[in-house]
């Protein structure tokens, strides 16, 4: 567990990375992250259906640009499984050029959403949707590995099993070097030394031997192209921002520091635009690599920049060796990532017994929609809307109306309590005895709050029904916001009389 205190050298006001001790920590941490990024960047490239160089270029440019433009220091952005899953159908059906165009347009959308304050909308995403989002991502990553285990030499299966065992038990001995990297090195040495004929990374494409060169996507610059890629670009933008903002919030909590979510959103967009022009598949914040970085003591942008820069150095210098990595090792890495990503506590019997049925339903719906559509953004939107409907139905029952008749029978007072909005105000009109009440009717809203035009229209309908019988209604007890809304809309709404 990290200490929540932040040393003075990490606080704003001076470039902490200029301090030798801090620079050493940041650079070493960046090196570890760069080593950990290689296998996952290659794996995510394969999920997206593109050459490994595409994911590696994306991890390089994303990390370098976000180190400068991002809002959360020490957070790692690179090619991710979530982004790979979004762009995979487009790359498979329409080609690499359309994928790159989608990354650029998606980056532009992220900048626009960031400028519009989309980060503030994250508060409206229920926790059950977040849990469903994470669980669905884990399921999709696992499902993407299944084809790699079909129609392969039998030796692939013990290799995958051995790699999984190594990654599970090795951290109990040492965490100095990421277990996935050690596993990949061990399996590569074994397959090369034993001359095992198994699928390798080199079978999927040639690794980069030089730095990426900027260029335009090879697509027609027409409205038809934009129409084709727009849904993918929007999903790309939403998924990337959601993962990035979730990760930024997590690092904020761990380090007890604040970061600009608006700047992070805009920075993610800028990083994706640059990544697209350099031929990368795009990306977003990586929870796993970010945690490695933060737990190693990194707190500044230097570690993020170092991770991206060293990643490209390792690929260019050691490219021929990396191409010998067996696919079994990468499959094992991704299986472990999927199991580590899944929130097992959320499906534990004890948790399910305590959770409200509505919360469980929202989580299940989110997972089901994502798995069915293979689109994380659609699942989050559907899950959020379902959660809002359940919440509205629950809150609607909190609005109550009670009546009190004066002893002399000349006046009746209706006390309305609760939140009045489109769901709760629908039943408001039926709570009054229009025919039996005396001529003087008082509606006391001291214990209520008016939230929308539907509630004002309902109150107008109550007044109209009493007026039709020659009775007078007085509405009292409005708080200031409610009185302002009622005064502005009462009598002006169509169909309210």
Image (cartoon, grey):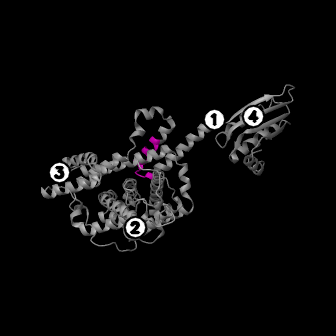
- Mark 1 or mark 2: whose residue is earlier in sequence: 2
The region drawn magenta spans: 363-376
- Eyeballing the image, is 132 above or below 208? above
Residue 390 point in image, percent of width and height: 55, 40
For the point 63% across and 35% down, the residue is 397
- Would you say the residues marked 3 and 4 are in contact, meaning their CB atoms lie under 8 Å apart? no
Q: Which mark is residue 153?
A: 3
Q: Which residue is mark 4?
A: 415
- Mark 3 or mark 1: whose residue is earlier in sequence: 3
- Eyeballing the image, is 272 above or below 413? below
- Eyeballing the image, is 142 above or below 197? above
Name the side, left or right, on which 389 lies relative to 270.
Answer: right
- Mark 1 or mark 4: whose residue is earlier in sequence: 1
Indicate yes or no whether the magenta region holds residue 370. Answer: yes
For the point 14% across and 55% down, the residue is 196
Does dot 3 land on a helix, a strand or a loop?
A: loop
Residue 22 point in image, percent of width and height: 40, 63
Name the side, left or right, on which 122 lies relative to 492.
Answer: left
């Amino acid at each position: 567990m990290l200490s929540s205190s932040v040393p003075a050298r990490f606080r704003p006001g001076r470039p902490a990375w200029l301090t030798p001790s801090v620079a050493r920590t940041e650079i070493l941490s960046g090196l570890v992250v760069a080593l950990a990024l290689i296998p996952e960047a290659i794996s995510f490239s394969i999920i997206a259906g593109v050459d490994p160089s595409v994911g590696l270029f994306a991890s390089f440019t994303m990390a370098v640009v976000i180190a400068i433009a991002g809002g959360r220091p020490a957070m790692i952005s690179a090619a991710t499984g979530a982004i790979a899953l979004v762009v995979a159908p487009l790359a498979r059906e329409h080609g690499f050029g359309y994928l790159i165009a989608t990354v650029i347009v998606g980056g532009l959308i992220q900048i626009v959403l960031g400028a519009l304050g989309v980060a503030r909308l994250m508060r409206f995403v229920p926790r059950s949707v977040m849990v469903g989002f994470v669980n669905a991502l884990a399921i999709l990553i696992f499902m993407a590995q299944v084809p790699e285990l079909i129609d392969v030499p039998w030796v692939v299966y013990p290799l995958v099993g051995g790699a999984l065992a190594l990654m599970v038990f090795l951290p109990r001995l040492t965490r100095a070097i990421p277990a996935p990297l050690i596993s990949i090195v061990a399996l590569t040495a074994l397959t090369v030394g034993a001359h095992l004929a198994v699928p390798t990374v080199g079978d999927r494409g040639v690794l980069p031997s030089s730095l990426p060169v900027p260029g335009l996507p090879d697509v027609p610059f027409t409205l038809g192209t934009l129409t084709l890629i727009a849904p993918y670009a929007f999903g790309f933008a939403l998924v990337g921002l959601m993962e990035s903002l979730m990760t930024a919030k997590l690092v904020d909590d761990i380090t007890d520091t604040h970061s600009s979510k608006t700047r992070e959103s805009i920075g993610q967009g800028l990083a994706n635009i640059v990544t697209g022009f350099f031929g990368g598949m795009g990306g977003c914040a990586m929870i796993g690599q970010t945690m490695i970085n933060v737990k190693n003591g990194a707190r500044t942008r230097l570690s993020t920049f170092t991770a991206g820069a060293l990643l490209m150095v390792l690929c260019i210098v050691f490219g021929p060796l990396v191409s010998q990595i067996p696919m079994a090792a990468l499959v094992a890495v991704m299986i472990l990532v999927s199991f580590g990503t899944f929130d097992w506590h959320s499906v534990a019997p004890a948790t399910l017994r305590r959770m409200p049925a509505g919360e469980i339903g929202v989580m299940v719906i989110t997972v089901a929609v994502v798995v069915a559509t293979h689109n994380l953004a659609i699942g989050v939107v559907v899950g959020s809307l379902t959660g809002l409907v359940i919440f509205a139905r629950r809150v609607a029952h909190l609005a109550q109306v009670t009546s009190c008749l004066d002893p002399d029978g000349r006046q009746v007072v209706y006390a309305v309590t609760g939140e009045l909005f489109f769901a709760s105000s629908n039943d408001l009109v039926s709570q009054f005895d229009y025919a039996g009440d005396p001529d003087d009717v008082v509606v006391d809203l001291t214990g209520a709050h008016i939230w929308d035009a539907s509630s004002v229209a309902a109150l107008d309908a109550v007044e109209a029904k009493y007026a039709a019988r020659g009775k007078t209604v007085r509405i009292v007890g409005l708080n200031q916001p409610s009185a302002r809304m009622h005064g502005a809309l009462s009598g002006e709404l169509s169909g309210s009389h």
